[in-house]
Image (cartoon, rainbow, N blue to C red):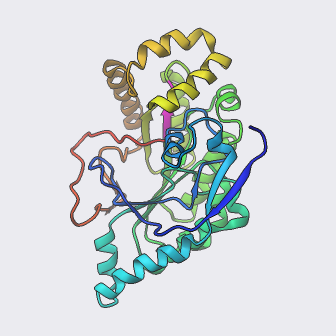
Amino acid sequence: MGKRTYEVIIAKQMMNRVKAPQMPFSYSINPYRGCAHGCSFCYARTTHTFLGFHADDTFQHHILVKSNAAEALETQLAKLAVKYQGNVRAVARHVGLVAVGTATDPYQPIEGKAKLTRDCLRVLAKYRIPTSITTRSPLILRDLDILCEMNIAAIHISVNTLKPDVIQRLEPATSPPRKRLDVVRQLAESGLPAGVFIAPILPYLTDDMDDLEELIKAAKEHRAQFAVPSVLRLSSGVKVWYFQAVQQHYPHLLADYAKLYASKYPDGDYTNALLKGVHRLLEKYGLPSLSSEFRVGDRQFARGEDSRRPKEGEQLAFSF
């Protein structure tokens, strides 16, 4: 499939309840479905199968655009405002933390024209909703004016390696990693809580401790306030697609991958050893990890008022 198509759809609601108790947010917002970045390892490819599509390159070539995103979000929050007699703080407490960009990058190229993410941020700012954002794109800097007015909990800029060959082969449509680190610096210099999402860490490709230390050191030098590590997970549909990329670019690693990923998660001993090493590096460079505590500086953000907090040390299961 070559040419990219955009399908305009109407969303019934924009804030989708997140029921998984290990997640640190109560709701997610995705103005788009599918992502033109097309990273071969993206777990969100699976979400396309929920829509009757496949987890293959359809994910990056058939993008669904929720044209009424901001209006649908306004409707949801306005109803809550009525319930709480216009008390915006009460609405924000009820909603808890909202994550923008969990099943797609909210700043993929179409956002440059459509501005759906920007419009949704305006609504979130109006109601003072605690918000986290995850993206690989420098386009987020366009919205600094709004971000600085929002109740931002964290901005995660995804950078899983500084190795240009891996970027070129597995996520060629994304911006260079050092350019993303520059985004972290600019966000931090604007007074925003910005950090690095070291995700996903790719076994045998980006898991070398020397390489990870180079990345973590660079993140610290670019004023990252935290770093969140997450290891690659492969659901069935994503595994087929990712293994094809490994076969194409790193055929000598295919057997090792097949052995490591008997399920969608890598072998537990491998993961535990890797994350212990990463956390030692984070401690060395003074970077807290939000995977075990959901706090930015002296500000802590709850999920919903009816949701439990993750246990100490519990790892998150989402990544870009």
Between 69 and 111, the residue placed more toward the observer is 69
Between 252 and 158, the residue placed more toward the observer is 252
**Residue at the outermost front position:** 52
Question: Per the image, is 200 magenta?
Answer: yes
The quarter of the picture where residue 219 lies is top right
Please give left or right for residue 262 compared with residue 254 in the image. left
Please give left or right for residue 257 compared with residue 94 in the image. right
The quarter of the picture where residue 269 lies is top left
The answer to whether residue 201 is visible is: no
Q: Residue at x 65, y 27 (%)?
A: 166
Q: Residue at x 37, y 44 (%)?
A: 289
Q: Residue at x 36, y 47 (%)?
A: 290
Q: Position of residue 1 (x, y in %)?
A: 74, 37
Magenta extent: 198-202
Looking at the image, how many numbered discs can be counted on the residues?
A: 0
Q: Is residue 154 above or below residue 173?
A: below
Q: Is residue 245 above or below residue 138?
A: above
Between 72 and 85, the residue placed more toward the observer is 72
